[in-house]
């Protein structure tokens, strides 16, 4: 498979500057584009129309919050974006490639190379240590696990502030720490797009803010993030808020300048860049 | 080793090399071992069927090999080109001369003459065998007199520790000479030099010309062949016996007295070629079967070679029933493992979802669970083989335990390791892993990743 165009984009690629949201000094290459996307679930006789013609473009460097009432189709949309589910109708281009027609193996390959997932339930493997959990995506990318890859995973664990917990198992970590491991894991394959479904849904306010600080820093280092959330408090960390209702996009608003620009240092930026 | 075993061994070797050297194989193996280790007891219990099945196959095959070797050794001792004809006292003996209590039956000198005309026969060794007390001064020994010809030594592969065996001249001249079995010699001559001394047998005195080396007693090889202890023997020339003891032999045993008139108790026939053994046996049968010659069935013919065929047949039977037995136990073991794997897959649904989200292909998931099942059955197979082999080698030691007498029959064969059975059972165990692992593995691989992720 050819490299996705986004893979070649860099922060200084002003030549391909496109209009869009965001702070303006990133190259505005499209990461994903969905057009009149429908998703229907049919069970026996009944049919649920979860997505009813969604159009959405997300560009490199964006930080999008998906909001909306329960049952409005946020998770369904995120699953489609994450190539875990296929749309019933409509097209989905990820980095210029039409993934809505891809087979299961190709989708797996897309997931392993271009996507990072962060879940509400953290979803770490309980029998693995912190470092081993971070390593998992590398296995399915076909990367040999050696001292180099191990060093990279350790670096990511340090990046999320768990350098001293490398050999702990998920059960021995707090929720916030587990979510940090999950974030490190979502970064290990240098994804073009990070998808997070209610990443702070199980965390208290203070920990939620720590996690959001981490995600913002990642976004500032160039990562594109799409996040589902219920809470306005969490959504305000992002740069763009997309609201859904009954399977369609109700509103789509710019949320810059974001309030965390002043949150200052405290995060090792050199590591963030290395991770990106 | 046959081609089948070679294929099995190379298949197993390929699998082992793949698991040990490739990155994917090593990781799969490690993953499998880890999750098996996580549930040690469960893994062990689900392996039990495979362990028992494999070790049973190894042990039973070893016993099969052991009994085959025993029979082959017997046949070798009896001689593959030999045919043995024995006189048999008919059970319903109306011809017995009741007045004199003389039983007359069996092979005759005339039979011997006729048999000598069969061209394929190279050697005829007749024997008369009867118990008789041997005396030397004040000592006496209850020995078994064997009246025979010099070739007896060749047929039975005798070794002498001293002197010589009977020679043709002894027979022609009806010399009063004898050769002593090891026990007879020891009991009659505890202190003196037996060679050249004389012993008394019945009314006559015989000069000892040779002493035999100790001979392994034959086990009763079933059928009409009884166990024999050659060490109690005393050998004299056939013609001498005929002249000195006459045609009738008085047998005194436990106070009762009986007599029988038997020309020969046994004739050992040697045939020139192994291919001619059976045809010659048929010819002899038809000659002796003539009712003019033997109105009653007072003889029996044994072709040791026939027993070889019997052994082959028995072995084939053992293999067949072993095959059925092994299939059943491995089937049961396989179902047990499949059951556990299905539960494992359900239990790890979420793990499957996570791995799929992180980029695992269906084939990666299939591989993971399949390897896990194969490792499980493979380890089960190895444990079974280890146990089976250990038992085979420990059998001899176990047999000496005080409790063992209850478990083992006296003449039961000792097991000999049948090496190909190791590869069979091991590869069958791994094969069972593949067959019974494929469904759970596919079930895991074809889960919907989203539903799997939602699974609690
Ligand atoms: N597998 C499925 N089968 C049938 N219907 C489904 C399935 N998944 C989702 N739905 C339906 O699709 C609609 C959208 O569900 P979705 O999970 O996307 O909502 P959501 O916006 O994520 O809600 P929440 O905020 O509660 O997580 C709902 O009506 C739901 O019942
Ligand atoms: Mg949801």
Image (tube, helix red, strand yellow):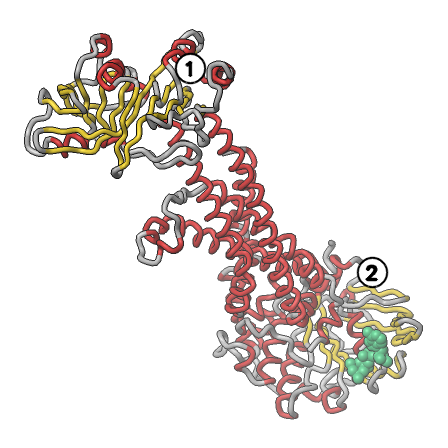
- Per the image, label 2 sits on a secondary structure element best described as strand
Report the front residue among A206 and A2: A206
Are the residues flagged by discs 2 and 1 in contact, CB closer than 8 Å? no
Question: Badge 1 is on which residue?
Answer: B271
- Tell me which corner region of the image, top left, top right, bottom left or bottom right, holds residue B272: top left
- Tell me which corner region of the image, top left, top right, bottom left or bottom right, holds residue B443: bottom right
Q: Is residue B438 left or right of residue A89?
A: left
Cβ at disc 2 under 8 Å from ligand 1: no
Q: Residue furthest right?
A: A45
Q: Is residue A81 left or right of residue A173?
A: right
- For the point 72% across and 66% down, the residue is A13
Estimate how packed mark 2 is, as few (under 14), some (14 to 19) or many (20 or more) residues with alpha carbons within 10 Å: some
Whether residue B215 is situated above or below residue A43 in the rendered picture: above
Whether residue B355 is situated above or below residue A232 in the rendered picture: above
- For the point 38% across and 56% down, the residue is B406
Chain letter for the residue marked with disc 2 in the picture: A
Q: Position of residue A267 (x, y in %)?
A: 57, 81
* Residue A12 in view, yes or no: no
Q: Which mark is residue A98?
A: 2
């Amino acid at each position: 498979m050819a490299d996705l165009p986004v893979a070649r984009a860099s922060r200084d690629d002003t030549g391909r500057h496109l209009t869009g949201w965001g702070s303006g000094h990133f190259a505005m290459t499209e990461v994903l584009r969905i057009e009149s996307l429908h998703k229907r679930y049919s069970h026996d006789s009944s049919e649920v129309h979860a997505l009813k013609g969604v159009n959405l473009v997300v560009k490199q460097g964006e930080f999008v919050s998906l909001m909306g009432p329960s049952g409005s189709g946020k998770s369904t949309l995120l699953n489609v974006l994450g190539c875990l589910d296929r749309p019933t109708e409509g097209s989905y281009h990820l980095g210029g490639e039409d993934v809505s027609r891809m087979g299961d193996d190709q989708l797996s390959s897309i997931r392993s190379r271009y996507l990072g997932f962060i879940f509400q339930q953290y979803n770490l493997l309980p029998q693995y240590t912190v470092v081993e959990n971070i390593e998992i995506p590398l296995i399915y990318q076909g990367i040999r696990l050696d001292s180099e890859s191990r060093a990279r995973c350790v670096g990511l664990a340090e990046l999320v502030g768990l350098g001293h917990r490398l050999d702990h198992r998920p059960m021995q970590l707090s929720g916030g720490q587990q979510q940090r491991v999950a974030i490190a894991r979502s970064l290990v394959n240098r994804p073009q797009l990070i998808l997070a479904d209610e990443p702070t849904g199980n965390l208290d306010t203070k920990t939620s803010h720590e996690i959001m600080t981490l995600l913002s820093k990642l976004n500032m280092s160039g990562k594109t993030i799409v996040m589902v959330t219920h809470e306005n408090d969490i959504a305000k960390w992002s740069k763009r808020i997309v609201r859904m209702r009954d399977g369609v996009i109700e509103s789509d608003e710019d949320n810059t300048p974001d309030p965390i620009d002043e949150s200052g240092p405290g995060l090792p930026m050199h590591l963030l860049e290395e991770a990106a | 080793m046959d081609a089948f075993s070679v294929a099995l061994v190379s298949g197993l070797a390929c699998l082992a090399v793949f698991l040990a050297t490739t990155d994917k194989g090593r990781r799969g193996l490690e993953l499998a071992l880890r999750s098996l280790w996580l549930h040690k007891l469960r893994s062990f219990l689900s392996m039990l069927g495979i362990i028992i099945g494999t070790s049973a196959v190894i042990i039973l095959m070893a016993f099969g090999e052991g009994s085959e070797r025993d029979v082959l050794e017997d046949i070798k001792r009896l001689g593959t080109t030999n045919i043995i004809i024995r006189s048999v006292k008919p059970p319903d003996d109306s011809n017995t001369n009741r007045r004199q209590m003389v039983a007359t039956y069996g092979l005759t000198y005339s039979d011997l003459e006729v048999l000598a005309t069969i061209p394929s026969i190279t050697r005829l060794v007749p024997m008369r065998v009867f118990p008789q007390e041997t005396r030397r001064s004040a000592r006496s020994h209850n020995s078994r007199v064997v009246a025979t010809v010099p070739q007896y030594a060749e047929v039975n592969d005798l070794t002498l520790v001293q002197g010589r065996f009977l020679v043709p001249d002894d027979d022609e001249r009806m010399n009063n000479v004898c050769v002593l079995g090891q026990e007879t010699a020891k009991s009659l001559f505890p202190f003196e030099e037996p060679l050249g001394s004389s012993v008394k047998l019945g009314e006559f005195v015989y000069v000892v010309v040779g002493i035999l080396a100790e001979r392994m007693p034959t086990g009763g090889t079933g059928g009409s062949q009884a166990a024999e202890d050659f060490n109690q023997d005393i050998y004299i020339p056939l013609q001498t016996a005929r002249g000195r003891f006459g045609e009738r032999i008085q047998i005194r045993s436990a106070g009762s007295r009986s007599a029988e008139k038997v020309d020969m108790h046994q004739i050992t026939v040697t045939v020139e070629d192994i291919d001619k053994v059976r045809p010659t046996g048929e010819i002899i049968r038809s000659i002796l079967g003539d009712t003019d010659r033997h109105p009653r069935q007072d003889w029996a013919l044994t072709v040791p070679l026939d027993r070889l065929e019997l052994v082959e047949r028995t072995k084939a039977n053992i293999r067949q029933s072993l095959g059925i037995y092994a299939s059943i136990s491995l089937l049961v073991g396989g179902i047990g493992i499949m059951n556990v794997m299905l539960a494992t897959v359900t239990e790890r649904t979420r793990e499957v979802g996570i791995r799929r989200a992180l980029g695992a292909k269906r084939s990666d998931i299939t591989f993971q669970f399949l390897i896990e099942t194969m490792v499980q059955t493979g380890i089960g197979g190895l444990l079974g083989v280890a146990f089976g082999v250990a038992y085979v080698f420990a059998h001899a030691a176990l047999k000496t335990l005080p409790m063992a007498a209850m478990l083992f029959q006296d003449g039961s064969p000792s097991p000999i390791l049948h090496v190909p059975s190791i590869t069979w059972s091991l590869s069958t165990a791994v094969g069972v892993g593949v067959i019974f692992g494929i469904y759970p593995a596919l079930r895991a691989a074809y889960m919907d990743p989203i539903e799997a992720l939602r699974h609690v």
